[in-house]
Image (cartoon, grey):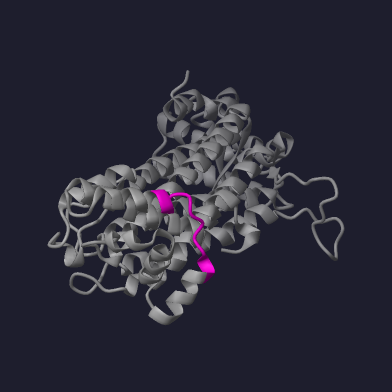
């Protein structure tokens, strides 16, 4: 995490003080359950809560202890004993380090998912607003980067809305997938701790018991979580790249908001660059980069090893913090995006009507021409227009083979822009569920 791409609310989830507070809560809830089962004195559990619940843990002190013990959980427990006193001997009874570490990580990932879902909601709201604003704003659709047939700018945004709605649903599922708790002891057999302790801690921490933990919570859950973040990041970049293309000088159908006093280049005062979209491309690549180590973390030796640990200490905060920043930046970009319908129309008209070639092709076949001949007739008139040599409709009207099948009026009718937009309402209803 670096401050430039970090928002405070998400960063706070990963701060050491937050982590140690979650560790304490896990231990204290476990103590409550052990006390109810008669394993430890009830007064001891009360003392643990009383002395620890409002404590500010000394991160420097824990680090100092860890330098000697070379074990982070033992260092924390040693510091906790300094706060709680003699009753600290009842803390962590029957538990192993992974009970604390894995349960804490899942709490943090669940909280991170909550923030990311809220971010997605803002993106979705922005896309919906702008989609309806430009529902019938005609623009050229492109395939392979080349003019194809007319669409609307609203449809472009509706496509993105549908994509991010799927992203939200996946993230909700990933949050559920990761919301498990393991308090099962060494190698996960509950030999030293009653399963009812796990059930109590899980409920108290907003989780559910892991059905089978092998001392660690299975990492396929985490792999799915980070894969979901990676797919969301890919969607972020897809939309960012669309904006970057639309902002190119030769296109200029839309561009990022350029604030008063903003500078685009240290050398060229005229520049207005798509810096936010380019930034989103870079950030998205970083989030996706963590998918591979998450998948590789699934493969642990026997009941456990810690080869996953070092990777997760970096990837969990970095991926969630980076995606959080990227989603909020994307929402702001869409909310303030400058749209130029006049340039869209100019680009639509740029190829002299070639965007209507398929309508003419179909009409010729319906009038009796073979598809092969119809394609040949249309293409031979399209290619000169492509080279800037004439008007498509005029050339068609002067082609004797075309005129065998179609009158001038019938040719003109095939150049109606509105024909391409007749099902926009249907698509919007499918995406937004509104008439």
Q: Position of residue 177 (x, y in %)?
A: 30, 49
Along the line of sight, the residue nearer the viewer: 235 or 382:
235
Q: Position of residue 312 (x, y in %)?
A: 40, 66
How many marks can you see?
0
Do we see residue 88 in this rendering? yes
Which residue is depicted at the point 36% across and 64% down?
294
Along the line of sight, the residue nearer the viewer: 248 or 286:
286
Q: Is residue 358 magenta?
A: no
Q: Position of residue 146 (x, y in %)?
A: 58, 51
Span of residues in magenta: 50-60
- Residue sitting at the far top: 435
Q: Is residue 271 above or below residue 65?
A: above
Q: Is residue 54 magenta?
A: yes
Along the line of sight, the residue nearer the viewer: 170 or 273:
170
Q: Position of residue 84 (x, y in %)?
A: 40, 59
Which residue is depicted at the point 73% across and 44% down?
257
């Amino acid at each position: 995490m670096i401050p430039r791409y970090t928002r405070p609310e998400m960063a706070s989830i990963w701060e050491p003080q937050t982590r140690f507070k979650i560790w304490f809560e896990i231990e204290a809830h476990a103590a409550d359950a052990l006390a109810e089962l008669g394993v430890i004195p009830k007064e001891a559990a009360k003392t643990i809560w009383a002395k620890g619940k409002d404590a500010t843990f000394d991160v420097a002190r824990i680090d100092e202890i860890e330098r000697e013990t070379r074990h982070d959980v033992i260092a924390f427990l040693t510091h906790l004993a300094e706060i709680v006193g003699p009753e600290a001997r009842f803390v962590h009874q029957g538990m192993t380090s992974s009970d604390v570490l894995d349960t804490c990580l899942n709490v943090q990932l669940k909280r991170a998912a909550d923030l990311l879902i809220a971010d997605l909601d803002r993106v979705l709201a922005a896309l919906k607003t702008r989609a309806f604003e430009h529902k019938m704003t005609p623009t050229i659709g492109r395939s392979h980067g080349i003019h194809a047939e007319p669409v609307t700018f609203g449809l472009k945004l509706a496509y993105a809305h549908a994509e991010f709605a799927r992203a939200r649903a996946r993230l909700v599922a990933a949050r559920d997938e990761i919301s498990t708790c393991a308090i099962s002891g060494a190698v996960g057999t509950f030999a030293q701790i009653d399963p009812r302790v796990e059930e109590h801690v899980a409920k108290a921490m907003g989780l559910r018991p892991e059905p089978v933990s092998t001392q660690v919570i299975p990492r396929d859950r985490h792999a799915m979580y980070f894969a979901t973040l990676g797919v969301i990041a890919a969607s972020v970049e897809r939309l960012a790249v669309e904006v970057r293309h639309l902002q190119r000088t030769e296109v200029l159908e839309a561009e990022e908001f350029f604030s008063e006093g903003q500078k685009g280049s240290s050398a060229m005062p005229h520049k207005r660059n798509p810096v936010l979209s380019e930034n989103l491309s870079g950030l998205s690549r970083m989030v996706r980069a963590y998918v591979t180590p998450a998948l590789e973390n699934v493969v642990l030796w026997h009941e456990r090893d810690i080869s996953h640990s070092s990777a997760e200490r970096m990837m969990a905060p970095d991926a969630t913090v980076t995606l959080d920043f990227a989603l909020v930046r994307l929402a702001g970009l869409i909310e303030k995006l400058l749209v130029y319908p006049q340039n869209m129309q100019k680009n639509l008209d740029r190829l002299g009507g070639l965007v209507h070639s398929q309508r003419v092709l179909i009409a010729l076949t319906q009038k009796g021409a073979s598809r092969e001949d119809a394609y040949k007739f249309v293409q031979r008139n399209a290619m000169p227009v492509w080279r800037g040599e004439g008007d498509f409709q005029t050339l068609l009207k002067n082609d004797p083979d075309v005129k065998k099948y179609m009158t001038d009026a019938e040719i003109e009718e095939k150049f109606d822009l509105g024909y391409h937009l007749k099902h926009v309402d249907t698509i919007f209803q499918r995406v937004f569920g509104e008439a």
